[in-house]
């Protein structure tokens, strides 16, 4: 231990406005910023949280009100102080904070001015405001007791017996230079609020399922469970525990899409509207989701693993080991657990890919007269691999049978397509590109899928197949096996 008694020192107090501008650049989205405010509400014991906004162009306000324990004047000033907690201090096991920065950095990231109104039991409501323009002008770390329309906000905090209301105004990152009657700006803002709703439904889904209610403009937000617990055909792996049982890992293999209704399939797409985007690890700290659908650098996202989702539960005293960031959006497994987590993930991924790939074989067993029709087939020629379009595919078979004199020309075009597939480039992109490979017709109009599916169905029924067998054969045909939700709309015309 160094003896500092006789060592010269000097003050290096941070410049207030520069430091706060630095806080603004941490990288919050509005979704993660609001989630950070809600963390404080949950830690304060809130049972209900109300998110509201008043669209007025550049004068728009956004508020988050809770019915937690609230704060008196001294407690509020401390809570408004940047770095109000030491991240090394031991915390209550249910505390969702760490750095004592969340309220400030989250609010600064979206607004130049924010106010916190609070009401503790036995105390009158109190409020203080951080105003970056005042800080820049005075060059001091000082709060001000000012907010426009103070009476309205006083009435709002009086609607709860105890609680806290965070009010963002001067929302320069969202509404700067917009007018109240700008319909395009308003529509964009409302779209962002929808994104907030879906994000919160995922991040706090376990709290919601335990009774927490979060409202957006008086409408309750429903939870979204990435593991679809309780659904038929869900496969769950035994729970694995690390670090003496403190860390829990559990893998889930979701049902193949042919086992899901259209509603269930769309539910599984989640807030990101994509099964591929939601595959991977879900890292929770105290039941609060930190990382959603990420392979933590262990694997790349590929469509074959869309049914694989793995839950990791951490207590809040592992933040440093897992490198949890201020925004609570990043987690990295420590090297000591890496191999165990890798092995567990591989096991779940292998099971998921079996379900994904072999659904066609299940149908084949049920209808022995049918076979699976892939669009592409692998072939060997002179000891090398090549890929050929399957001439027995129902779609191509029908085309060739009706092509007449053009059949030879069509065959030539198909052969050129087969011989010029850029396999080396595809392989290189798959190994180096972080973006997942899209599934057939993903992100584009599905009319071609629906129309050809209906046409094949009509042809199968006309050839003597029963409606059930005709639908099963289509589900056995690539790429229609990717879109079983359209099967129920097929009609015998």
Image (spheres, helix red, strand yellow):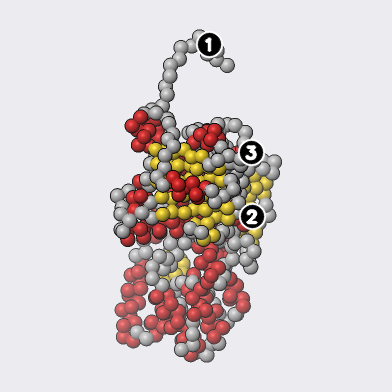
Q: Is residue 281 above or below residue 97?
A: below
Would residue 26 be found to the left or right of residue 366 on screen?
left
Q: Earlier in the sequence, mark 1 or mark 2?
A: 1
In space, the residues marked 1 and 2 are separated at their CA atoms by 54 Å
Quarter of the N terminus within the rendering: top right
| Image quadrant where residue 17 sits | top left
Residue 92 is marked as: 3
In space, the residues marked 2 and 3 are separated at their CA atoms by 19 Å
On the image, numbered disc 2 is attached to which residue? 210
Q: Earlier in the sequence, mark 3 or mark 1?
A: 1
- Please report the residue visible at 53 percent of the width from the left and 67 percent of the height from the top: 265
What is the x, y in percent for residue 214?
55, 55
- Please report the residue visible at 34 percent of the width from the left and 65 percent of the height from the top: 420
Choose mark 3 or mark 1, whichever is in front.
Answer: 3
- Asked which secondary structure carries label 2, the reply is loop
Is residue 334 among what the camera can see? Answer: no
In space, the residues marked 3 and 1 are separated at their CA atoms by 35 Å
On the image, numbered disc 1 is attached to which residue? 5
């Amino acid at each position: 231990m160094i003896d500092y008694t006789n060592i010269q020192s000097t003050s290096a107090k941070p410049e207030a406005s520069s430091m706060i501008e630095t806080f603004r650049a941490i990288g919050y989205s509005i979704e993660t910023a609001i989630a950070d405010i809600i963390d404080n509400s949950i830690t304060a014991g809130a049972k209900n949280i109300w998110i509201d906004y008043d669209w007025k162009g550049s004068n728009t306000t956004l508020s988050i009100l809770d019915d937690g324990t609230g704060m008196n004047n001294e407690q509020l000033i401390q809570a408004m102080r940047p770095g109000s907690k030491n991240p090394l201090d031991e915390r209550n096991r249910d505390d969702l904070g760490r750095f004592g920065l969340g309220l400030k950095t989250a609010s600064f990231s979206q607004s130049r001015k924010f106010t916190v109104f609070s009401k503790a039991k036995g105390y009158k409501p109190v409020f203080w405001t951080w105003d970056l323009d005042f800080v820049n002008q005075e060059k001091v770390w000082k709060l001000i007791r000012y907010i426009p329309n103070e009476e309205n906000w006083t009435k709002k905090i009086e609607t709860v017996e105890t609680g806290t209301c965070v009010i963002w105004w001067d929302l320069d990152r969202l509404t700067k230079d917009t007018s109240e009657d700008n319909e395009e700006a308003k529509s964009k803002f409302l779209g962002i609020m929808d994104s907030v709703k879906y994000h919160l439904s995922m991040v706090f889904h376990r709290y919601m399922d335990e009774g927490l209610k979060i409202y957006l403009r008086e409408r309750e937000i429903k939870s979204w469970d990435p593991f679809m617990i309780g659904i038929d055909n869900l496969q769950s792996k035994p729970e694995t525990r690390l670090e003496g049982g403190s860390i829990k890992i559990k893998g889930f293999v979701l049902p193949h899409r042919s086992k899901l209704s259209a509603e269930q399939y769309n539910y599984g797409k989640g807030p990101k509207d994509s099964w591929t985007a939601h595959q991977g690890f879900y890292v929770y700290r105290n039941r609060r989701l930190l990382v959603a659908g990420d392979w933590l650098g262990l694997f790349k996202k590929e469509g074959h693993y869309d049914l694989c989702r793995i839950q990791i539960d951490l207590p809040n005293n592992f933040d440093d080991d897992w490198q949890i960031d201020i925004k609570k959006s990043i987690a990295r497994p420590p090297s000591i657990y890496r191999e165990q987590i890798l092995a567990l993930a591989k096991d779940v991924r292998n099971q998921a890919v079996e379900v994904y790939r072999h659904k066609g074989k299940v149908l084949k067993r049920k209808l022995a007269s049918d076979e699976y029709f892939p669009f592409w087939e692998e072939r060997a020629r002179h000891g090398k691999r090549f890929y050929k379009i399957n001439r027995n595919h129902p779609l191509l078979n029908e085309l060739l049978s009706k092509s007449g004199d053009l059949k030879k020309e069509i065959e030539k075009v198909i052969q050129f397509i087969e011989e010029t597939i850029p396999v080396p480039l595809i392989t290189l992109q798959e190994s180096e590109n972080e973006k997942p490979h899209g599934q057939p017709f993903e992100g584009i109009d599905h009319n071609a899928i629906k129309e050809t599916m209906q046409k094949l169905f009509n042809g199968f029924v006309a050839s003597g197949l029963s409606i059930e067998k005709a639908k099963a054969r289509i589900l056995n045909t690539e790429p229609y096996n990717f879109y079983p939700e359209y099967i129920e709309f097929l009609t015998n015309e």
